[in-house]
Amino acid sequence: MSDTVRQDIIFKILKIASDNSDLSSDEQFNLAESGTQALFAQLVNEGAASSTGGDSDREKARTKRRMKKKDRNQRKEHVGRFFMRLMEKNIKKPELPDCLLPIFAKSVHATIGEDNYEAMSGKISRLLEFGEKKGYEYDQILDSKPGKTIAGEILKLYKDEMGSGSFEKQLKFSLDETLVKNIPNIENGADLNIEDTVSLAYNEFNKFLSNKAS
């Protein structure tokens, strides 16, 4: 009996339930039953279960699906994620709400420009693909030596391109806007001084850039 086939059946059932959430339980059950018949037949077929090559291919596909599901949100902004990895522990202070950190990551695209962004995105995609094949999790890839090297390259590009006079104004505006939207979700948000918090966030971010990016 193959563990891989059992896992494929579970994934299939979950997908059917997710794609048909508007249907009743009975209707979802019928769809799941018909949609997994072939997999159940494969599960009880000793010949298929003993096929090492088939199980290997399915295991790779299952691992890829799992990582894609876990990391799909991170991958949408993976250049920003690599950029922030070097500094998030340094600029994350008790006075700074977590909702502000993604703003720095999102600023990468506009700051370094489309060509640089695409070049970094390509490097990260190749690293992620290599890391997946080796079985590494997303955070392990971020913290690897190649991951830190790419992060350093992004950091240098960011430092080189942030000289525009409107950079500070635009970034502070984004921080302010995000903070205002998230105040209801922030502990003691009603007592938060928005202007001071935005200035602190920007100053800590700029301090790190000045110290680390040369």
Image: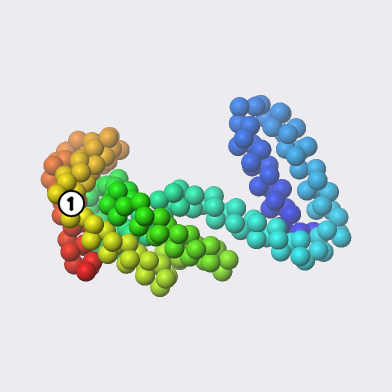
Residue 177 in the image: state x and y as whole percent. Answer: 23, 37
Any part of residue 81 in sight: no
Q: Is residue 157 left or right of residue 44?
A: left
Residue at point 17%, 61% (across, down)? 207
Give the quadrant of residue 29: top right
Residue at point 42%, 57% (across, down)? 121
Residue at point 49%, 53% (across, down)? 71
Q: Give 152 or 204, whichever is nearer the viewer.
A: 152
Which residue type does callout 1 highlight? Ser
Q: How many marks?
A: 1
Residue 115 in the image: state x and y as whole percent. Answer: 36, 55
Any part of residue 50 in sight: yes
Pick the quarter of the image with the N terminus.
bottom right
Q: Is residue 196 left or right of residue 30?
A: left
Q: Give 46 or 209, whichever is nearer the viewer.
A: 209
Check disc 1 and report its element: helix, strand or loop: loop
Q: Give 189 or 64, whichever is nearer the viewer.
A: 64
Which residue carries the number 1 mark? 164
Q: Residue furthest front?
A: 115
Residue 63 in the image: state x and y as whole percent. Answer: 61, 58
Q: Is residue 121 left or right of residue 33?
A: left
Q: Residue furthest bottom?
A: 145
Residue at point 27%, 52% (across, down)? 111
Q: Is residue 176 left or right of residue 81?
A: left
Residue 41 in the image: state x and y as whole percent. Answer: 83, 49
Pick the quarter of the image with the C terminus.
bottom left
